[in-house]
Amino acid sequence: MLAAMSASASPPRPQGDACPGTLRLHRADDGALARVRIPGGVLTPAQADVLREVAQRLGDGQLHLTSRGNVQLRGLGPDCGPELARLLGAAGLLPSERHERVRNIVASPLAGLDSPGRDGIRPWLTALDRLLCGSDKATALSGRFLFALDDGRGDVDALGADLTLLAHGDGGDGDGGAQLRIGDADTVIGIPATDAPRAALLAAEVFLDAARDTGAWRVKDLPDEQARTALRRDVVRQLERSGISVTPQPPRPRTRAAVPPALGPVHGPDAVALSVGVPLGRLGQEQWRLVSDAGELRLTPWRGVIVTAVAPDRAQERLSELSAAGLITGPGSPWAGVGACIGQPGCAKSLSDVRAEAEAAVGPAGPAGALPVYWSGCERRCGHPHGEWVDVVATPDGHRVSRVREGRWDNAMVTARNSPAALTAAVAAARNSPN
Ligand code: SF4
């Protein structure tokens, strides 16, 4: 039996932050790896095309989506760094070399697309990225430190960011307000929507002061609740000193279940967007072309994409094209909710080829209402989901299948050894179990 354990009590790390970026490549078993930060997951068609070309010319040809709406390029040659930086820089994907690994911003992917007036977080995204890239102090943030911009629907609020800006009232367009959540606290700080990006940067800088002696990379790494409470107090003080008015707010508990955009058409006032899932977060050249040939492309923190600016009379035709190309266009797909880390042969730490195993376990039809499942080649569980999900991890003793709620593992349900059929059955049972 596996004792219940917490994923939230990560100790501070004395060693350096080895998080990969565009300029700091990570050496993997399948070649070098670059992680390209895409704030808000937002790409223009031209930027998307540059990424596709770079993946083709310098890497394995595929675009690998991450759980923060970024793109990883894999299979890169060891000497491609300068060329990679040149191409991405020319496309506006590397606005500041010193800040390239700290531009970690997720944003509600459907903001402004499915309901009029809820597009106030787009100015936040632009401003926060610009402020981050202009801050000398922010270069000291860890590559893991995460900002979330939530338009009020609670989707990215559930992702456990270090700093979350929440629109409330009208979606943050300036007439309503904004709230700043620090870490996981229920307490939120009320601020004017127009000051929200500046408040987020100031809070990050105050965190760096608080973290200096502890080695903490993230808010949750601070030694205890007392330290996190002191951080919130110091942030309020700094906001007021900087002329940002702070208003008391009732507690707003963090959204617990991360709800990705429903798959399929998303109807807006003038155009349709398409919410599309990507099996195992990996897009080939033609798939990438198909999703990025219309308007802006948005990558979601659930390894999906939002294709925007689709003419309403072409929406069904486009969905059929995307489905025929192997993408997930509706909840009935057997791939809906299935994820996996890179596993073998790309990662030396992996004990198995979890992508192939996940694929083999995918049934003929998507189980309605089934929990998401995530396959990991080792206990690190890179890129695992949040909220409630089924964890399949390769161990020296076999594949362990457990259920996770709020970062806590239930007692292990089953360990399957050398039996793909038993493993598939155990995963299906865990995903469909009522409790
Ligand atoms: S979870 Fe383990 S096996 Fe999978 S990518 Fe991370 S380190 Fe590699």
Image (cartoon, rainbow, N blue to C red):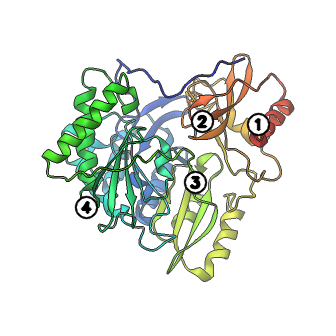
Mark 1: secondary structure: helix
Give the amino acid type for the residue marked by disc 4 in the picture: Thr
Question: Residue at label 2?
Answer: 342
In three-dimensional space, the C-alpha distance between marks 4 and 1, rounded to whole angstroms, equals 45 Å
Residue 201 percent coordinates (x, y): 25, 46
The residue under label 4 is 194
The residue indicated by pointer 3 is 260
What kind of residue is marked 3?
A: Pro
| Separation of residues labelled 3 and 4 (CA atoms) | 27 Å
Residue 124 percent coordinates (x, y)? 32, 58
Q: Is residue 428 visible?
A: yes
In the displayed image of the protein, which residue is found farthest to the bottom? 313
According to the image, label 1 marks what residue?
430
Q: Nearer the viewer, residue 355 or 205?
A: 205
Q: In terms of sequence position, does the residue under pointer 1 or pointer 2 come before the other?
A: 2
Answer left or right for 67 relative to 46. Answer: right
Asked whether the beta carbons under mark 3 and mark 1 sit within 8 Å of each other, the answer is: no
The disc at residue 146 is none
Q: What's the CA distance linking mark 2 and mark 3? A: 21 Å
Residue 39 located left or right of residue 193: right
Q: Is 289 positioned to the left or the right of 362 in the image?
A: left
Q: Quadrant of the C terminus?
A: top right
Secondary structure type for disc 2: loop
Q: For the residue carrying disc 1, how many other residues have a C-alpha within 10 Å: few (<14), some (14-19), or many (20+)? A: many
